[in-house]
Structures are given as structure tokens and as C-alpha cells.
Image (cartoon, rainbow, N blue to C red):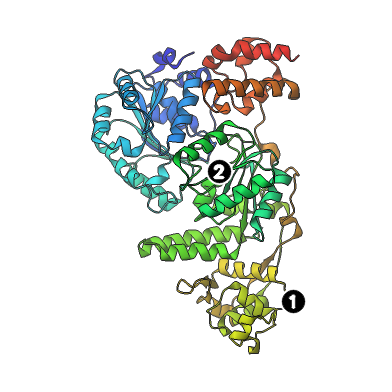
């Protein structure tokens, strides 16, 4: 049923059955999740609000459905062309009248979209913030009937956030020029400071905030000691995610290129993505990742926001992100379909030193630097915790994890040993002090284990009382101690001497024995790849079916059919039908249109467009 056929529901915002009818008819879903229904009712009735919901949690429905139920067109402020394109393609497939205004359109195409808006022929229009703020676009909106404004990726408005975009600040004009039109700000991640700035800048101070759980139970969190990151990455992919789609994040363009090349040589299909590549190459690589199965993209943080691919099975970091918000946002691109996925990171002391140096050398104000360092310290604390990583992650966002242990992170699955490390810490801090607080990790470890290098001789450090006092630990163990003391705040990188570590005020109490130190020991299981199912794997949603198992032959036939349809229509395969829908069909083997309509993800328009073909494929595979 095309969206226009549902028009009579518009304007009756407090009529819940209308919302359910549209949800079922357009999106093929039988019910709401979490606070979706409450949010949708609120916006349909004309209310403003802010929505924090994890990636894959159903944020889009919170504005798409009200736009279909209210008079006029819903205007969605979106930061990336890729996001607009995928959203419009998916909505169009479902029978919704959707379009986008962005720089990829010709003048004639843009004029056509504007005419459709003024004629009331659009349900949803996606617009980039910089375009929306032009006098021409604001004038256009002033002449159109607007159902609502949805500000997606709303954390971009915050100067304290991890992805600040200056053009987002200008969106305060929406509250000033269109005070009667409801505004809904949406994001997957924002701490309290960021939330305050979002509400202040977008005029939502008095609006309710709907904050869903930040927990993504289907994601397993693994953080390993960085040794040879590329070798570790290859082993991780081969042992746990062979043939899966994934994203690998690196800090520099050069590292992106090297890593993509190394993976390709190892037989793992990988593509680089960074701002230094030609725009056509970036676009081609992104399209291949979205449309093909089993590809890995190696990227800087320029890649990811707005990527709607549901079957990304892993996100890997070869460098430390800037904050827990950035880590959460990036890892959240895995497992949007709710299936078991992995967030894997290789992390070392050099990452902390590098990130802190970047903060200190930035042009930001001192207040910004202090906030940035605090955010970095919180992420380091997550990396070094001996407890449940999920609990630590959720705690950062102010959410209490009642279970205590999640059973789906490396620390829960292979608990690290913790011991009294006061003496070990004192030896290291003494070494830092006696060598003049002018040296980096490698030199300090050489002195501690008594390694007589040329550099040790050069400075006469073999004559110090601390030379060789740490022979009970090897180099890898001392690196772990160094990282933990930095995480605890007893050591910090010296911004004036690259790579050097110096004592903090709290180190004095440790040296005097007034402060205890508990150190985590890494167990063998932390670096051992495993395909074993996590204890939370059964929490991942399973495809609805009346059968007992997926028909593998039929599943292959359906996937091949979907790929061909997607190729002909020029859209990603998941826009045609999601994996869960394909698997639901392969499991229940519907023989009639009514049975096919019961599969989640089959709305009226998709039943009309693909129903006969799908039933024929089911019958042919019997």
C-alpha cells in the first residue's frame, strides 16, 4: 500500500491504531520497540523532544512515522549524502514519497524536488544543514506545509562532542522561524555535557528527553594488548569473522592504505577509505561496501556516520579513538541487525601518548583541552579496567548495569587476574624519577630489566640504583604496568618532550606507600582468537518463522535473487530486503501472500512489488 493511501490517518495524532496500521502497512512491522510508541505519539501531537537511542535501536521510525501521520512533509536534517541516499532508497522501496536536497543533484533535479515539496507530494525530505540554512531553502520551507523537523546526529551541534560540525549551530533558526513545527533531535551517543548543549542550541530546554538503554547486548567488546597490530587484526578476522563485512579504523591515512593492502595480500578483501582519496574513489569504495557481501573497509573516522548497512559483523580499532563517545559511536556500526557482532581494539601506551599530544598541541581553548583530556582518560580507564567493560561503558553514560557482569566482553569471558602491585608501581615510578622524567616507555623498561643499550650507557643509567630492579617482569608485562599507571593518573605524557613520561602529584603517595595499587594481569585467553558463542548470543533477535530451521538452499536462492534485484534497481541489497526478512522467508517458506505478509519487513508495497516472485522462489525450492 503506497504511503499516499494512508493519508486519512494524518492529523489524528492521538489515534494509536493509526500509528500501528501505518507501521504494519509501510514497514511490515507488527509492534513498537521500547519508547518508540511514546515518542511517536508525542511528536504526532505536536511536541518537541530529544531522543537518545543506540545505533540499530529504531531512531528513524521516531520521525518517519510521525511524518506520515501529520499533515505536511517531514524535514530531516542529515549530515551526510550517503545517509540521505540510503534512507531515501529504503523509504521509496517501502512506498514512501521521499527525496533529498544535496550537492549531487543537478539544478533541474533540485528544482523538481522543490516543486514536489510545495505541491505536497513529499512525505519526507532530507536536507544537509548547510543547505537548509541558505536563504533560498529557508524561504522554500516557509512556503511549504511542514510536518516536523528531525535533526539527526544531533551530537554534531555540541562543541564538546566527538564530531562537532559548525553548521549545526545555525539550526537554532528552526525554533525561531518555525516555532509551531515540532522538532525532534536524535543521536546514538551523548554524555550529560553534550545533551545540555544539544537542548540549549536547538531550543529544546523544556522538551522531554527519551533516553533508551545504551546497551547493545549483541556486541562483544574485546580489547587486546597491541603488539603487532596488523598481524593481530588478520588473525582476529580469519579466526572469528572470515567472510564477514567489517570496518577497521586507523588514525592516519598512511596506516589506512598499509592496512588495506596487507589485508588484501592476506586474502581478506579490503578497501581503503580516507579524505585524501579522490572523491570518485571514496564513493566507489563506499558503494561496494554497501552493495557487496564480505568486504572490509579500512578507514579514518571520515567513514561511518550514516552507514546504514545492517550486517557489519565487526568493527576493529588499530588506534585509540578520542573518547568513549567516539568509541561507542564507531563500534555501534556493528550488528545493527541485532545479530552477534564484535567490537575489537588493539591498544598500547603509544596510543595514549599520541592522543594526549594531539590534544595539547591543538588550537582549542584550555577549557576544551581539559574536557578532551578527561574524555581520553575515561576511555583509557575502559581499556584498562579489570571489570566488565559493558558495565564501565554504560556507567560513563550514566546508566547502571544491574547485572554486574555481561558475559559478553573479554573480561567477563576470560577474567583477568588482579594482584597487589604497590611494589611494582614504586619501582617504575622511582625509575621515572631517577632518570629525570625525560624518557619514554622503551628506555624506562630497558633500565628496569637491566638491558645495557647504547642509550642507557649514553646517559649513565646503568649506574642508577633502579637499573635492573625489575627483572621479575618481561618487557610486555612492564608495558602493561606503564599503561595502567597512566590510566590511574600516576603517570602522564609530557607535552613538551615527545614520548616522555613524567610523574603526577598522585605518584608521590604511591612512592611513600600511602596509596595502594592493584594491577591487572593479562591472561592467555585475552589474545586467543575464539569462535565460541558468547553467553549473551541468545539475546540477538531471531527471524520470525513458523518453521524450525532455515532452508539453506532456499536462503541461497533468495540471496541471489535479492542481489540481482538490488543491482537492477541500483540500491544496496538490504534496501530490497533485510537479512532477517530473507531468513524469515527461508525458515517459514510461505506459500500464500497472506503468509508472506506475516514476515517482518514485508510491507504492503514490498508485497505488491515482490510477492509473486518470492512465493515462486519458495515453491521452486521445495
Left or right of 494 in this view: 140:
left
Quadrant housing residue 295: top right
Q: Which of 217 and 429 is in front in this view?
A: 429
Callout 2 touching callout 1 (CB < 8 Å): no
Left or right of 280 in this view: 555:
right
Residue receiving disc 1: 472
Left or right of 575 in this view: 344:
right
Determine whether 47 is above or below 330 in the image: above
| Element type at mark 2 | loop
The percent position of residue 368, horizontal first and vertical second, equals 38, 60
Q: Identify the residue at horizontal 45%, vertical 25% (top origin).
A: 65
Residue receiving disc 2: 332
Q: Identify the residue at horizontal 56%, vertical 23% (top origin).
A: 566
The percent position of residue 412, horizontal first and vertical second, equals 69, 53
Kindly give the residue lying farthest to the bottom in the view shown: 463
The percent position of residue 129, horizontal first and vertical second, equals 34, 38
| Element type at mark 1 | loop
The C terminus, quarter of image: top right
Determine whether 336 is above or below 411 in the image: above
Could you tell which of marks 2 and 1 lies nearer the N-terminus?
Answer: 2
Q: Nearer the viewer, residue 284 or 98?
A: 284
Q: Nearer the viewer, residue 513 or 253?
A: 253
Q: What is the spatial separation of the Cα atoms under label 2 and label 1, in whole angstroms? A: 40 Å
CA neighbours of label 2 inside 10 A, class few (<14), some (14 to 19), many (20+): many
Q: Which of 19 and 461 is in front in this view?
A: 461
Amino acid at each position: 500500500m503506497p504511503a499516499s493511501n494512508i493519508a486519512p490517518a494524518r492529523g489524528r495524532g492521538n489515534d494509536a491504531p493509526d500509528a500501528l496500521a501505518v507501521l504494519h502497512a509501510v514497514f511490515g512491522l507488527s509492534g513498537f520497540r521500547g519508547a518508540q510508541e511514546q515518542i511517536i505519539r508525542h511528536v504526532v501531537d505536536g511536541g518537541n523532544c530529544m531522543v537518545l537511542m543506540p545505533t540499530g535501536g529504531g531512531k528513524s521510525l521516531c520521525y518517519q512515522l510521525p511524518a506520515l501521520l501529520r499533515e505536511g512533509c517531514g524535514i530531516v536534517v542529515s549530515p551526510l549524502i550517503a545517509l540521505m541516499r540510503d534512507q531515501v532508497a529504503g523509504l521509496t522501496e517501502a512506498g514512501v514519497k521521499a527525496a533529498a536536497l544535496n550537492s549531487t543533484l543537478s539544478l533541474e533535479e533540485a528544482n523538481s524536488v522543490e516543486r514536489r515539496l510545495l505541491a505536497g507530494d513529499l512525505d519526507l525530505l532530507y536536507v544537509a544543514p548547510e543547505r537548509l540554512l541558505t536563504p533560498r531553502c529557508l524561504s522554500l520551507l516557509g512556503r511549504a506545509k511542514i510536518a516536523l523537523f528531525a535533526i539527526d546526529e544531533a551530537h554534531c551541534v555540541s562543541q564538546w562532542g566527538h564530531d562537532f560540525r559548525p553548521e549545526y549551530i545555525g539550526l537554532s533558526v528552526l525554533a525561531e522561524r518555525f516555532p509551531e513545527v515540532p522538532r525532534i533531535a536524535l543521536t546514538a551517543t551523548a554524555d550529560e555535557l553534550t545533551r545540555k548543549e544539544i537542548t540549549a542550541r536547538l531550543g529544546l530546554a523544556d522538551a522531554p528527553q527519551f533516553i533508551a538503554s545504551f546497551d547493545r547486548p549483541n556486541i562483544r567488546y574485546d580489547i587486546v594488548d597491541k603488539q603487532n597490530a596488523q598481524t593481530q587484526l588478520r588473525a582476529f578476522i580469519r579466526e572469528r569473522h572470515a567472510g564477514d563485512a567489517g570496518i577497521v579504523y586507523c588514525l592516519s591515512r598512511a596506516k589506512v592504505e598499509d592496512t588495506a593492502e596487507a589485508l588484501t595480500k592476506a586474502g581478506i578483501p579490503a578497501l581503503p577509505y580516507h579524505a585524501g582519496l579522490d572523491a570518485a574513489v571514496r564513493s566507489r569504495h563506499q558503494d561496494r561496501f554497501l552493495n557487496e557481501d564480505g568486504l572490509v573497509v579500512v578507514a579514518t573516522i571520515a567513514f561511518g556516520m550514516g552507514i546504514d548497512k545492517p550486517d557489519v559483523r565487526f568493527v576493529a580499532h588499530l588506534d585509540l579513538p578520542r573518547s568513549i563517545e567516539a568509541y561507542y559511536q564507531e563500534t555501534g556500526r556493528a550488528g545493527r541487525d541485532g545479530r552477534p557482532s564484535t567490537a575489537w581494539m588493539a591498544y598500547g601506551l603509544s596510543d595514549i601518548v599520541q592522543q594526549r599530544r594531539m590534544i595539547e598541541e591543538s588550537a582549542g581553548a584550555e577549557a576544551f583541552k581539559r574536557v578532551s583530556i578527561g574524555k581520553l582518560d575515561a576511555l583509557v580507564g575502559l581499556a584498562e579496567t579489570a571489570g566488565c567493560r559493558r558495565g564501565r561503558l554504560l556507567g560513563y553514560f550514566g546508566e547502571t548495569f544491574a547485572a554486574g557482569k555481561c558475559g559478553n566482553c573479554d573480561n567477563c569471558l576470560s577474567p583477568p587476574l588482579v594482584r597487589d602491585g604497590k611494589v611494582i608501581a614504586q619501582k617504575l615510578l622511582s625509575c621515572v624519577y631517577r632518570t629525570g622524567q625525560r624518557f619514554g616507555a622503551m628506555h624506562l623498561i630497558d633500565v628496569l630489566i637491566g638491558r645495557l643499550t647504547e642509550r642507557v650507557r649514553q646517559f649513565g643509567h646503568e649506574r642508577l640504583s633502579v637499573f635492573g630492579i625489575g627483572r621479575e617482569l618481561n618487557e610486555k608485562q612492564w608495558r602493561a604496568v606503564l599503561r595502567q599507571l597512566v590510566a590511574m593518573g600516576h603517570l602522564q605524557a609530557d607535552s613538551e618532550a615527545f614520548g616522555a613520561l613524567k610523574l603526577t602529584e598522585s605518584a608521590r603517595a604511591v612512592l611513600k606507600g600511602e596509596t595502594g595499587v592493584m594491577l591487572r594481569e593479562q591472561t592467555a585467553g585475552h589474545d586467543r582468537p575464539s569462535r565460541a558463542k558468547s553467553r549473551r548470543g541468545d539475546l540477538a533477535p531471531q527471524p520470525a518463522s513458523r518453521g524450525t530451521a532455515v532452508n539453506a538452499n532456499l536462503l541461497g536462492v533468495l540471496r541471489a535473487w535479492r542481489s540481482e534485484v538490488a543491482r537492477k534497481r541500483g540500491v544496496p541489497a538490504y534496501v530490497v530486503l533485510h537479512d532477517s526478512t530473507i531468513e524469515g522467508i527461508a525458515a517459514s517458506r510461505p506459500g500464500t501472500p497472506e503468509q508472506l505478509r506475516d514476515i517482518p519487513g514485508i510491507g504492503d508495497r514490498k508485497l505488491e512489488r515482490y510477492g509473486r516472485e518470492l512465493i515462486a522462489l519458495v515453491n521452486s525450492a521445495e
